[in-house]
Image (cartoon, grey):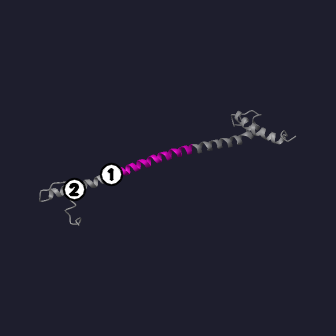
Amino acid sequence: MFGLFEIDFKKFVLVAIILALPLISINIERRDAGNSKWYQQPFLIIVSPIQEFFTNFAQGVSHTTGYYVNLLGVKRENRELREQVSAYKQQVAQDVELRLEYDRLRKLLDFQQTSPSKLSGSQVVGVDLWSSNEYSS
């Protein structure tokens, strides 16, 4: 009528074979044709390359997925290591600044001890801006 139920016999046989081959290959446990029965040998000859293809394909997908998962782990570890390196660089910068401050204070102490007059350390807490000539009008 509308061509909905017309069946092409060649396509039907092709689909049946395509569906049957994986099922047959699952049922055939051994690839060794010498130990198989006489009626299994033709199926082994047909199915063996197909089974090898699917096995290699599955292993390739498995390896690729494994590499991808490992890559994600490496990226996460890389990010964590970069954060640690940044923290260490900041710590080193603080240590360098502390070392410079230590050296400055050591020089001041050495100057104080080698000076002929008696010196004491102090800190400037304020400046009288009005007594200076620069700021008067």
Residue underneath mark 1: 94
**Which amino acid, mark 2?**
Gly
Left or right? Give the position of 40 relative to 8. left
Residue underneath mark 2: 126
Q: Main secondary structure of the magenta part?
A: helix
**Which amino acid, mark 1?**
Gln
Q: Quadrant of residue 96?
A: bottom left
The numbered dot on residue 136 is none
Q: x%, y% of residue 102?
A: 25, 53
**View extreme (right): residue:** 1
What span is in magenta?
Answer: 66-92
Left or right? Give the position of 108 relative to 47. left
User: Which circle, 2 or 1, is nearer the viewer?
Assistant: 2
**In the picture shown, does residue 132 fall above or below 59?**
below
Q: Nearer the viewer, residue 119 or 64?
A: 119
Q: x%, y% of residue 63?
A: 59, 43
Q: Classify mark 1: helix, strand or loop.
A: helix
Q: Classify mark 2: helix, strand or loop.
A: loop
Q: Nearer the viewer, residue 4 or 131?
A: 131
**Residue at horizontal 50 percent and vertical 47 percent from the top:** 75
Marked residue nearer the N-terminal end (2 or 1): 1
**Residue at horizontal 15 percent and vertical 58 percent from the top:** 114
**In the picture shown, does residue 107 fall above or below 58?**
below
Q: Badge 1 local density, few (<14 within 10 Å), some, or many (20+)? A: few
Q: Nearer the viewer, residue 12 or 21?
A: 12
Q: CA distance from mark 2 to mark 1?
A: 29 Å
* Magenta-span inclusion, residue 76: yes
**In the picture shown, does residue 88 fall above or below 43?**
below
